[in-house]
Amino acid sequence: MLKLTSKILATVIAFCGAGAAWAQDSGPLIDLLVRKGVLGDQEAEELRAELLKDFAANSPAGKLDLSARVNRLTIALDGRIRYQYDNEVTNSPGAAGPNNDRSRYRYRFRLATTALLNNNWNLGLRLETAEGATSTNDDFGASGSTNFAKTGNTAFVGQLYVGYAANNALGGRVDHLDLRLGKHQHPFFVPGVNGFYIDSDINVEGISEQLTWFDAPAKGWTLALRGGQYLLANNSRTTVGTAFTNEPSVWWVGQAELSKTHLFENNAYGTRIAPTIMTFTAPNIVSDAASYDNFLVFLLPVEHTVRFRNQPLSIYATYGVNFQGGMKANRIYPATENPSSYNQMGNFGLRWGGARNPGDLQLTAEYRYVESGAYATFLADSDFNAGRTNGAGYIVSGSYLITDAVTGTVTFFHAENIDKNSPSGIGFHRADVLQVDLSARF
Amino acid sequence: MNKLLAFLTASAIATTAFGQGKLVIKGSDTLGAKMVPQVAEAFRAKHPGVVFEIAAEGSTTGIAAITDGTADIGMSSRRARATEVSSALAKGVTMRPVIVSWDAMAVIVNESSPITKLSLRQVEQIFAGDVKDWAAVGGNPGAISIYTRNTSSGTYQDWKDLAMKRRDYAPSSQKMAGNEQIAAEVGKNPSGIGYVGIAYINAPGVKVVGIVNAAGKLVMPAAESVHDRSYPYARPNFFYTNGEPSGLTAEFIEYLLSAEGQDMVAKSGFVPVPTKS
């Protein structure tokens, strides 16, 4: 017994000497010493106080003052340095602009903090560079009148949301419930580079819901129902006659995903299929009619992933049709033309590689096709064809994980107009973009 | 303990030979509601020249008062947190704890309930919301009404640590301002359950539930079960000082830890500090 207690005491003393890293873990050991009668209660408290003092003085964690309401706080930062070359030729080559032929040297950061609160609630905030909805990039060398000025190098609130995520929710009727209210990342399945039909830089504003059932409708399958109601314009200062309209324009999205997947070496394998429907509603005012009318879109994204050369190989595709695409095309084209069949869109791609561990390579090749009336320009990936409709082309991309935190990526986008005679602004004669990125994150 | 008492005695004799001065005590409402004022009154009877200023506004205020130098003693029903210790260190203050009493947190139900005992696991499941109906733990069928302290209370967190493996409370749990309020609500509600300090177990309409501890033994909250460590929901109460107590502060703490002082601790409903045999 003496031998055992001597060893234990020696261990505690060693803990004291080891400092902050051990200080917070020694509570159970002190409790054990008290139970065994080696330490008295007061001696134990003095030892605890000494260890806590050491922890508070020497550990960064001991100096953080977090509310007891926080169960876990996550701080994440990603930074990216980019070279980007754009070459965009208008539908009438040789005519006055936009004929962009330019190089840009860009950067972005996204600093996010997420707090898991008590009783399944959470709170998230993300600051980002750039004010545009579909870009987080800021440009070097474009900041005001003096060299190296910081003018315009501003951080914006990209996300601010309150969420609720719980297992066995709604009295056990739902295996997992995830709700988000505010400005946040959408929950929808969007296979393709940069999110294809919802640009991955977009932070939606409104409510997202996701209800998930495991082993449904059959063992091994998962059913997820997702909904989104997002404000596009609140119209609170829009007047019709002498009164404020005060009726918001809203983007409505619904998606049902059926999947059968499994994880292997942190990569998901299997099949996902997610029929999606979306529309806009807007008050009958001129400004909103131009942006939001004639939009009732059905999309069918699918993805199947198999193992190939010890890495995941994903084959993905999306087919989409705007049931009011003909009307939209007719509205945006001159009256002399009849582009009423321009209402379909889609992508098809191959992605190989997990991009999970240092040394991993990920290669992607994708074909895209978006007709003039098929979709909304402010939702689509802004790097392909500048987000415009009336474009078909390809994307090739390669990423290499230099370390588990640092990635090098090269991506090339090429698009040409589907309707060669379309008016200016509806697609490009040709739009090429080259991006060379070095990204780091934690 | 003997070493501490010897130090306190020496300090007291050296600095307060005439038993005069002012002692500012701030902190825990659990300690400051009854126990400390009673001991202070008895101390004053022996030292008429001593003036006490006691403010019981929660453990956090007591620890902050030591850091700020606005109190001689900080009462606390919980241990100081790392951030509080680091804040104190930044101001040159070293938090020193002295255990002055123990409290046993009792699980109470309405006196009409057939429940007489619960296991550790059942207590955790009830307060975390895993078990929602009394029938699941041998009671009359019906939804369980859970009463807890409010989130700003040190006891709220202590109960999670002691009884719930640090899990969240059931979302349906109702937050009460203090022990009296929990006891009153459980006393009125046949489906109620809550936890109170041992000083509050004799409230009307409630009864204490025995706990089947990790050794499989049925134990009730009492001085004996706290001292022999068989009762699982026991916690020490502290006086915090800036470094080693001295002068009048040391004298008062010495008195509280004396047999006479600890007798008053017991009479005020708390568990005295066990004497080392």
Image (cartoon, coloured by chain):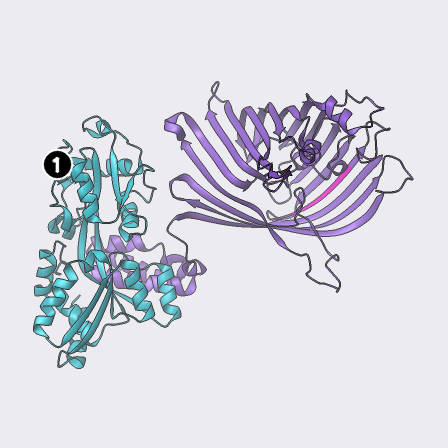
Q: In the image, what residue occupies the spot 75% across and 63% down?
A: A145
**Front-most of B90 and A157?**
A157
What is the magenta range? Answer: A407-413
Closest to the observer: A139 or B266? A139
Q: Colour of chain B?
A: cyan
Locate residue B82: give its quadrant: bottom left
Residue A185, compared with residue A338, is above or below; it is below
The residue at 11%/67% (across/down) is B41
Local crowd at mark 1 within 10 Å, few (<14), some, or many (≥20)?
Answer: many
Q: Which chain is purple?
A: A
Question: Where's residue A113, x and y in %?
Answer: 51, 49
Q: Is residue A372 visible?
A: no
Q: Is residue B220 visible?
A: yes
Can you identify the residue that label 1 sits on?
B111
Q: Chain of mark 1?
A: B
Q: Is A338 situated left or right of A29 in this image?
A: right
Q: Secondary structure at mark 1?
A: loop
Q: Residue furthest front?
A: A242
Task: Return the x and y of residue A226 as percentages of the image width and height.
Answer: 53, 28
Q: Amino acid at mark 1?
A: Glu
Taking A311 as reference, is B64 left or right? Answer: left
- Placement of the N terminus of chain A among the 4 image quadrants: bottom left
Q: Is residue A365 left or right of residue B32?
A: right
